[in-house]
Image: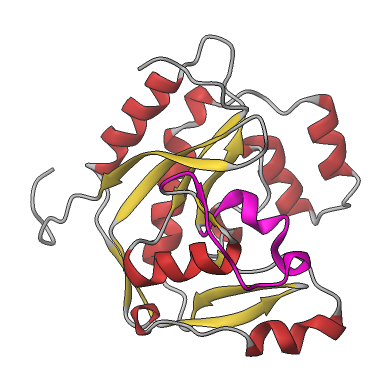
Amino acid sequence: MPDPVFQRIALYHVPDGPLGNFGADWLGWDARSGTVRESATPDHWTSRARRYGFHATLKAPFRLADGATLAQAAALSEALSQTLRPATIGDLEPRWLGRFLALVPVQPTNAIRDLAAQCVRALEPCRAALSPAEAEKYAARDLPPELQANVNRWGYPHVMDAFRFHLTLTDRLPKADRAAAQAALCLPPERLGYRLSHISLMGEDTGGYFHEIARYALADRPEGSAR
């Protein structure tokens, strides 16, 4: 696999079907096909979130380490997918996480947290260490010690026990816009009883937009079966 010009790569969960179409239309960018979508959502609600596409982060965006390749990351992602089982997330509801709106599980489960932790670990051999500028950005946020420890070890604060599954819907919005943003949502029924059954290797182009490079179905084995 030749290496296209991607600034960073990541592992995401990118919904498909009606929920994925809703998210692409809402944000105005379909990371699955790498295409702009006509969106009625006000630009100032989603201008930053749009670039990432409708997704849940499993392994946050990172630069490839010296000597690491996109082909290596793809091989590790595919191998990982065969060790993971689909995770039932359950019903998703819109909720404000600080200043941004996202779809989050009504009842968080350990299964999705553990799946995300395995994604974080699996691509560590490909991840470049944080640059001084990146490290300084986190240091300036004065994170709690446990989150700063995650940054130091994994390059991102919200991993392992600090992970929270969410599908981002907006940028950080002022209070004056929040009621209108939530009222504008017209969510499909596929957000109920949601099941995560695939992961996606993503790449960030030179314009800052993320594209789905490859999608990997998770191995749907019965409980207790041999791997």
Which residue is rendered at x = 59% and y = 32% of the image?
A: 205
To which quarter of the image does residue 171 belong? bottom right
Quadrant of image for the N terminus:
top left
> Which is nearer the eye, 19 or 37?
37
The reply, left or right, for residue 28 in relation to residue 138 is left
Q: Is residue 102 in the magenta section?
A: no
Q: Position of residue 153 (x, y in %)?
A: 64, 36
The image shows a total of numbered marks equal to 0
Examine the image and state in which quarter residue 95 appears. bottom right
Q: In this view, does 62 lie to the left or right of 25?
A: right
| Placement of 74 over or under 31, stated as above or below | above
- Name the spot of residue 135 as percent of width and height, x first: 81, 34
Residue name at image x 35 percent, y 72 percent: 18
**Figure check: 64 above or below 77:** above
Residue 42 placement: quadrant: bottom right
| Camera-side residue of 5 and 122 | 5
Region in magenta? 33-54
